[in-house]
Amino acid sequence: EVQLAESGGGSVQAGGSLRLSCTASEYSNDLNCMGWFRQAPGKEREGVASIRSGRGETVFSDSVKGRFTISQDNVRNTLYLSMENLEPEDTAMYYCAAGLTYRSTCTFGPPATWFRWGQGTQVTVSS
């Protein structure tokens, strides 16, 4: 079973940058989606960015489009989330996830299904 481990969270001031990493314990042919989700206190978990393995097609939430970039290093089995121009509203626990879809892009909800989750890494943005 694939295990996911996030790192790179921290505290920054508004306008700052962070890069999150997510390392998978192994490669799995059964999972073709990798993504980042976040959950702020008192709010539901929301999708932030996803990437379709093999195709490289990405999806971003409207709130982060133009500020966040998702990428993956298949040699290192590592997923990245580069975050720029951070805002206090980006404060949340960020989770890495791996899943499966039959489409060309990995949606945050159906038809993509997310099977594996990391423990999360905290991002705090102060104004």
Image: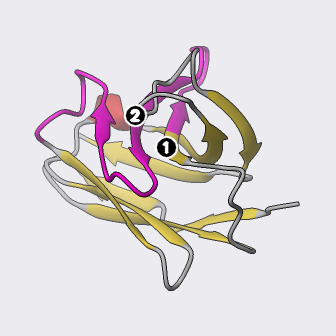
Is there a contact, CB below 8 Å, between mark 1 and mark 2?
yes
Instruction: Count residues near mark 1 (Cα–Cα under 10 Å), then give few for <14, some for 14-19, many for 20+.
Output: many
Give the amino acid at mark 2.
Val
Please give the name of the residue rendered at 52% of the width and 34% of the height, measured from the top-left corner: 38
37 left or right of 71?
right
What number is the disc on residue 83?
none
Give the amino acid at mark 1.
Trp
Quadrant containing the N terminus is bottom right
Q: Is residue 62 magenta?
A: yes
Please give the name of the residue rendered at 23% of the width and 37% of the height, measured from the top-left corner: 87
In the image, residue 5 lies at what x, y percent?
68, 66
Task: Give the structural element (helix, strand or loop) at label 2.
Answer: strand
Image-quadrant location for residue 61: top left
Q: Which residue is mark 1?
A: 36
Q: How is the image coloured?
A: secondary structure
Q: Which residue is mark 2?
A: 48
In the image, residue 11 lies at what x, y percent?
40, 58
Mark 1 or mark 2: whose residue is earlier in sequence = 1
Name the residue furthest right.
Answer: 1
Task: Give the structural element (helix, strand or loop) at label 1.
Answer: strand
- Distance Cα–Cα, label 1 vs label 2: 5 Å
